[in-house]
Amino acid sequence: MTDATPLSFYEEVGGHETFVRLVDAFYRGVAEDDVLRAMYPEEDFGPARQRLTLFLEQYWGGPGTYSQERGHPRLRMRHAAFHVNPDARDRWLAHMRVAVDELQLPPLQEATLWDYLQRAAFAMVNTFEPTGIGPAAHGRATTSLPLTAPPPTDPGSSH
Ligand code: HEM
């Protein structure tokens, strides 16, 4: 007898244990990253790790616990509060790359996962402003391109 139900990608790559390994490895990198580390509101990465794990599991056909706990993902909206510029994206992806490599998946599954993570990370970028540490760099306002929001109104200017 054969079971005709196709395996989900979640099951194919090894289920819960695989996603836990992925996200744990990813956050080990984030913890060492000055720019990303500063963006995480909580002292320890436990809750953030849990949210990312549950989201990825749900996305790939595993349990729907993420939405039961958090509602609709609306990931771009949830990231609006964070300064996700190309530098942050590239750092995020660099830590994910290390984490994906650690899984040692078969090439097709690895490519599927990596392709998704890259596209998702590019879609999450919400500013081209440099990382906001210290005073604004000279020329910043004129060289940046507001993509998702209009530039802030100058409180000193008339309409
Ligand atoms: C591109 C660079 C990215 C940066 C800098 C970034 C940063 C962050 C930060 C600071 C948080 C808040 C931590 C928390 O409370 O959970 C967060 C949450 C989260 N991120 Fe990202 N993220 C990025 C890309 C992504 C991508 C590509 C995904 C999905 C594939 C993702 C999925 C999530 C999820 C699921 C949460 C928790 C949302 C919630 O339920 O509140 N992030 N991210």
Image (cartoon, rainbow, N blue to C red):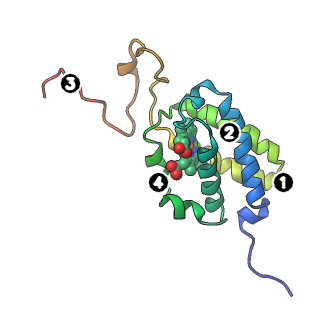
Horizontal side of residue 109 vs 115, given as left or right = right
Q: Gap between marks 1 and 2, in whole Å?
A: 23 Å
Q: Is residue 120 at least partly visible in the picture? A: no
Looking at the rendered image, the disc whose residue lies closer to the viewer, 1 or 3, is: 3
Q: Is residue 27 depicted above or below 56 in this figure?
A: above
Q: Gap between marks 4 and 1, in whole Å?
A: 30 Å
N-terminal-most mark, 1 or 2: 2
Q: Which mark is residue 74?
A: 4
Q: Residue at x 66, y 32 (%)?
A: 31
Quadrant in the picture for the N terminus: bottom right
Looking at the rendered image, the disc whose residue lies closer to the viewer, 3 or 2, is: 2
Q: Secondary structure at mark 2?
A: helix
Give the residue type at disc 1.
Answer: Pro
Q: Is residue 12 depicted above or below 83 in this figure?
A: below
Residue identifier under label 1 = 106
Q: Gap between marks 1 and 3, in whole Å?
A: 55 Å
Q: Secondary structure at mark 3?
A: loop
Residue identifier under label 2 = 27
Picture mark count:
4
View quadrant of ligand 1: top right
Looking at the rendered image, the disc whose residue lies closer to the viewer, 4 or 1, is: 4
Horizontal side of residue 59 vs 144, given as left or right = right
Give the residue type at disc 2.
Answer: Tyr
Q: Residues within 10 Å of mark 4 (few under 14, many from 20)?
A: few
Q: Secondary structure at mark 4?
A: loop
Q: Which mark is residue 155?
A: 3
